[in-house]
Image (spheres, rainbow, N blue to C red):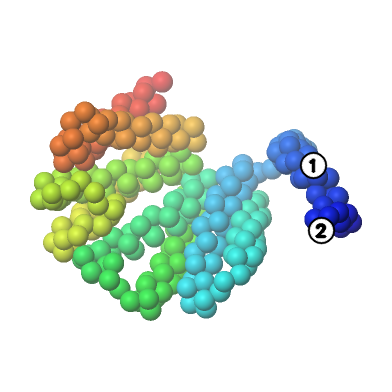
Amino acid sequence: MRSLSAGGILFPLALDQQANVATCAACITPLACLGTSATLALTSPLKKPVAISSFTGALDGMLWSALIIANIYVNFSVEDLKIAATLFLFGLAGGNAAGYLAGYGGGSEGAYVLKTISAVQLLWAYFQTLRIIYGDELTQLSQSENNLHLAAATTLSIGGGLRTFALNVNDYDITAGDALFIGSNTLKGALILSAPITTAYLFSQDTSYFPPGFYFDRVFGRLDGVANLAGAFLGAYISYRIAKKDDLSLLEGIVYSVVPAFAYWAALAPTSVVPEYYKIAPIFQVAFDVGTSMLVYRFIKDF
């Protein structure tokens, strides 16, 4: 890069030009990506699962590369951030490419979505299992124990996600919308069974602050872990049986998954007016979420 020195101050002549080029590239890139994708879709005989499989593959790549990066950094004390950026981009691109190629092999759209949902929810399930085992001592584990659990959770997420895909890849009764329906109800089941325990815990405390998932009480922490896992299992099982009979489109699955979440958070609103409301908020949050879910589901089926 050429530069000019004046009065002991170095002025990079190419700096403004580089900034302009970067700005130009940033403006053009979204249109270029959209145009390329649209051109491929219009000129290539894409099979139906390709869009879903490539998108979920990219999500898997991001999640699993992030977990692998975390394992590398905590076990080998790596400080170079370029390694993390490189591995993350490689994971994203590799997952996207793997999903794209897998989609050409066919399979159920729901299987691709369930794979990604399982990869995330199995991490959550592993955390709940640790709560049951360690109780309030979970935050006091040694560095080596934390590293071991991180490695186990990473293995469970990758292996469990792929196993879920293998079990459902030829099940065409499970659509992409059904998969979102199952994933959403898995979380709802956990919320329903854990809400009474959360409420009882809040009534036993003098403060409203506690990190989500951490109850600084051995009994409540373990009970909540059991309730979450049991509720998640029941929610997944019941919704799976429903999904086998009623097929939801992708849009219907997205609406069913997203809209009740607004009701769930809306149930917290009275806290700003009645400070003590937070103690019973979990019950109202579940009631709002489940009620809205039933309303949305009936609307979907009727219209």
Residue 28 is left or right of residue 157, and the answer is: right
Sequence order check: which comes first, mark 1 or mark 2? 2
Image side of residue 158 versus residue 220, left or right: right
The front one of 90 and 273 is 273
Quarter-of-image position of residue 134: bottom left
Dot 1: few (<14), some (14–19), or many (≥20) neighbours within 10 Å?
Answer: few
Element marked by disc 2: loop
Give, as a three-letter code, the residue at label 2.
Gly
Q: Extreme left residue here?
A: 204
| Residue depicted at 44% across the width and 36% down the height | 253
Q: Position of residue 98 (x, y in %)?
A: 63, 57
How many numbered circles does the render carry? 2
Q: Residue 128 carries which label?
A: none
Question: In the rendering, at what x and y percent does residue 112 appear?
Answer: 52, 50
For the residues labelled 1 and 2, the Cα–Cα distance comes to 26 Å
Quadrant of the frame with the N terminus:
bottom right
Residue 44 appears in view: no
- Please report the residue visible at 13 percent of the width from the left and 49 percent of the height from the top: 206
Which residue is found at the position 35% from the left and 57% from the top? 124
Q: Nearer the viewer, mark 1 or mark 2?
A: 2
User: Label 1, on which residue?
Assistant: 20
Instruction: Identify residue type, mark 1.
Output: Asn
Identified at 37% across, 42% down, the residue is: 184
- The residue beneath circle 2 is 8
Question: Does the residue at mark 1 contact the one at mark 2 (Cβ under 8 Å)?
Answer: no
